[in-house]
Amino acid sequence: MNNAVNLLQQYISNGQLDKALVEAKKLLLANPNNIFIQKLLSHIHNLKEDYRSALEVSNNLLLKHPNDFDCLNNIGYYQMQLEEYKLAEQFINKAKSINPNHPAPYQNQSDIYVKLRLFDKALEELDKCILLHQKHSNDYFNYKSTLILKIETFIALKKQSEAVEFIKYYL
């Protein structure tokens, strides 16, 4: 199975998402209870921007594992992409309650606030997210996107001088 998973991850890395999807489904047929493969299948749907399919896979997984942090946070993200903001917030808040030190649900919550044009609330979530990235994460890609979103939020609030100071400090 390790070779098959490596091939699957290679397809994803190379952007061969249709091949990855076919292989993930084959792997899942042979290993129907494998959580990792189920999460990978959901991730592939997400990369293909097929949020409904990603949501379906994650919801099925959540039935078996109701306190799975990744599942809850990802469902919140997929619901956000489908513009189901209230529902998204419920899953994101549950993810926060399970792992309050992970920055991802705070990033997702801030994204919702930005989409709803609640920029002050977005800044509060972004501050928490940045702090958690600094303390607990080595995920530079997501940290960078959080910093950029904070700059964009300052600009949306017409707080250019704060944006400039933030850029000087963090970038």
Image (tube, rainbow, N blue to C red):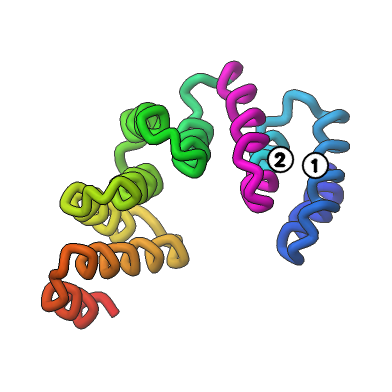
Q: Quadrant of residue 166?
A: bottom left
Q: How far from the left and from the top, in percent, is residue 94?
A: 36, 27
Q: Residue visible at 64% across and 52% down?
A: 47
Residue 156 vertical placement versus 27 (above, below): below
- Horizontally, residue 110 falls left or right of residue 33, namely left
- Write the residue at 66% across / 44% down: 50
Judge whether 127 appears above or below 45 on screen.
below
Residue 103 visible, this angle: no
In the image: residue 155, left or right of residue 106 = left
Q: What residue type is labelled 2?
A: Leu
Q: In the image, is residue 141 part of the stretch drawn in magenta? A: no
- The residue identified by callout 1 is 24
Mark 2 and mark 1 in contact? Answer it, CB < 8 Å: yes
Instruction: Report the quarter where the C terminus lies.
Output: bottom left
Secondary structure under badge 2? helix
- Residue under circle 2? 41
Q: What element carries label 1?
A: helix
**Residue 121 horizontal/vertical position (percent):** 19, 47
| Magenta stretch bounds | 43-64
